[in-house]
Amino acid sequence: LMWAGIRLFVTRRLEREARAHAQAAQSGHEHHSAGSGGLSWRQRLTSVRAWSDVAHNFRGDWEMLWKEITAGFVIAGFIALLPMDFFNALFLTDESGWLKTLQNVIVGPLVAVLSFVCSVGNVPLAAVLWSGGISFAGVIAFIYADLIVVPILLIYRKYYGMKVAALISSIMFGAIVLAALLVQGIFDVAGLIPETRPDVESITERGIEWNYTTFLNILFLGVAAVLIALTLRSGARDPVCGMTVDRLQTPFRSEWDGKTYYFCGEGCKSRFDANPEEYLDPSRPREHAHAHH
């Protein structure tokens, strides 16, 4: 559906403009990868250099997204405290037939966009909505909408420009609605839509339990700690964008006043070389160019 929408509504001219805009937005930011060094899979799994690449990419992603992820947890937490009547007021739940389905499948993505639960909490909240009486298609549309939450829409605008970003987002919204209706139709014909709905208390009042997900969370917290430790071993901060780079592997470095500075790409290095003192001012805010990662 998304492919068909792009083919129908995004012209070649718009595509060229969006491509040029994206190239300009990420110009000069090149990120080293162990895969580009011709390493085999076995070498990647056993090489400290390869794991260092993984660690720095991991840290770069968190440096780029930690504010959005934190906000998602906080917002989703507050939304979970809202009474069920609040959601019932947004959705048609007492109606039946196509009117309820159509309204739910349109409002579902809008609630997801405004609440910014993304993949942090969209399934638990979708379960709450299902227990409150919204249609199956509305629940599916709500889950699909994590591709058009506000932070991702801002990324689309940054890379493709406002016009193309608005067009792509509109096409995505339409694809989400149609896909949700299609899924409901298939599940209805196959008799897979549940006939009973759980009590909301069984979802919202569920406590923390020791199960396999708990142990997996502990395991991957340990893996994350090891990856962060690897970045501390050889990491250096790009003075232009603030991104952490591997000083042992990045080819982009400059000498200034007896000290070596390391950069994520040629763009940051060129800007630093043109005016080092500007980027060494501690009061100057970073450009956060690592969002181009």
Image: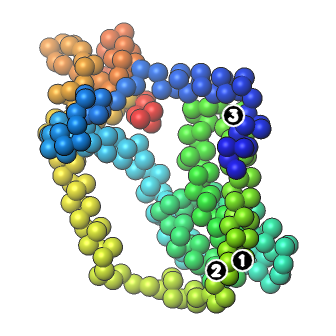
Q: Earlier in the sequence, mark 3 or mark 2?
A: 3
> Which of these two is toward me, 76 or 217?
217
Hey, which residue is sitting farthest top in the picture?
274
Q: Say which element carries label 3.
A: helix
Q: Earlier in the sequence, mark 1 or mark 3?
A: 3
Q: Which three-letter amino acid code belongs to the residue tagged 1?
A: Asp
Residue displayed at 63% across by 27% down? 18
User: What residue does disc 2 label?
Assistant: 192
Residue 223 image position (x, y, % from top left)? 22, 56
User: What residue does disc 3 label?
Assistant: 164
Q: Which three-letter amino acid code belongs to the residue tagged 3?
A: Val
Residue displayed at 59% across by 39% down? 156
Number of residues whose C-alpha sits closer than 10 Å to that of mark 1, classed few (under 14), some (14–19) or many (20 or more):
few
Q: Say which element carries label 2.
A: loop
Residue 112 image position (x, y, % from top left)? 62, 61
Residue 201 image position (x, y, % from top left)? 53, 88
Residue 142 image position (x, y, % from top left)? 64, 65
Q: CA distance from mark 1 to mark 3?
A: 36 Å
> Which of these two is toward me, 240 or 91?
91
